C-alpha cells in the first residue's frame, strides 16, 4: 500500500472516511496521484489539501474537509 512521503493521510481524505477506515484509507488513493502530489510539494513547498485535522491550519488556510478524496455524499 503506497503512502505519501510529504502528506499525512488526514490531508487527503474527509474526516468521515478517516473515522471509518483509519490508516486503511490509504488503499482508497491512487498511487500515481500520491507520487504526483509528493513531487509537487517537494518542488514548490508547503501546500494543504484538507485542514480539518489541525486547528492551526484551518485558521490559517480555511477549514477544508472535502478537498481531497470525494465521497458519494459530497
Image (spheres, rainbow, N blue to C red):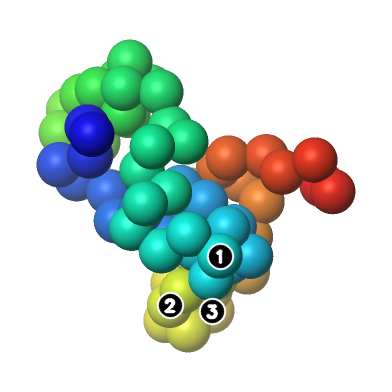
Q: CA distance from mark 1 to mark 2?
A: 19 Å
For the question of whether residue 9 can be seen, the reply is yes
Q: Position of residue 54 (x, y in %)?
A: 43, 77
Label 3 with label 1: CB-CB less than 8 Å: no
Label 1 with label 2: CB-CB less than 8 Å: no
User: Toward the viewer: 62 or 3?
Assistant: 3
Picture quarter containing residue 45? top left
Which callout, 3 or 2, points at the residue further toward the start of the chain?
2
| Labels 1, 2: front one | 1
| Labels 3, 1: front one | 1
Q: CA distance from mark 3 to mark 2?
A: 9 Å
For the question of whether residue 44 can be seen, the reply is no
Q: Which mark is residue 20?
A: 1
Quadrant where the N terminus sits is: top left
Picture quarter containing residue 40? top left
Q: Which mark is residue 59?
A: 3
Residue that numbered label 2 is attached to: 54
Task: Count numbered badges in the picture.
Answer: 3
The residue at 31%/28% (across/down) is 34
Q: Secondary structure at mark 1?
A: helix
User: Toward the viewer: 42 or 2?
Assistant: 2
Q: Position of residue 24 (x, y in %)?
A: 37, 51
Furthest toward the right, the residue is 73
Label 3 with label 2: CB-CB less than 8 Å: no
The residue at 61%/45% (across/down) is 67
Circle 3 Cα neighbour tier, 10 Å, few/some/many (<14 / 14–19 / ≥20): few
Which callout, 3 or 1, points at the residue further toward the start of the chain?
1
Q: Secondary structure at mark 2?
A: loop
Picture quarter containing residue 36? top left
Q: Which mark is residue 58?
A: none
The residue at 52%/51% (across/down) is 13
Which callout, 1 or 2, points at the residue further toward the start of the chain?
1
Amino acid at each position: 500500500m503506497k503512502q505519501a512521503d510529504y502528506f499525512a493521510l488526514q490531508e487527503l481524505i474527509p474526516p468521515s472516511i478517516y473515522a471509518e477506515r483509519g490508516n486503511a484509507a490509504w488503499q482508497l488513493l491512487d498511487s500515481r496521484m500520491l507520487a504526483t502530489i509528493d513531487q509537487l510539494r517537494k518542488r514548490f513547498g508547503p501546500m494543504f489539501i484538507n485542514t480539518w485535522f489541525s486547528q492551526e491550519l484551518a485558521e490559517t488556510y480555511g477549514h477544508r474537509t472535502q478537498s481531497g478524496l470525494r465521497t458519494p455524499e459530497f
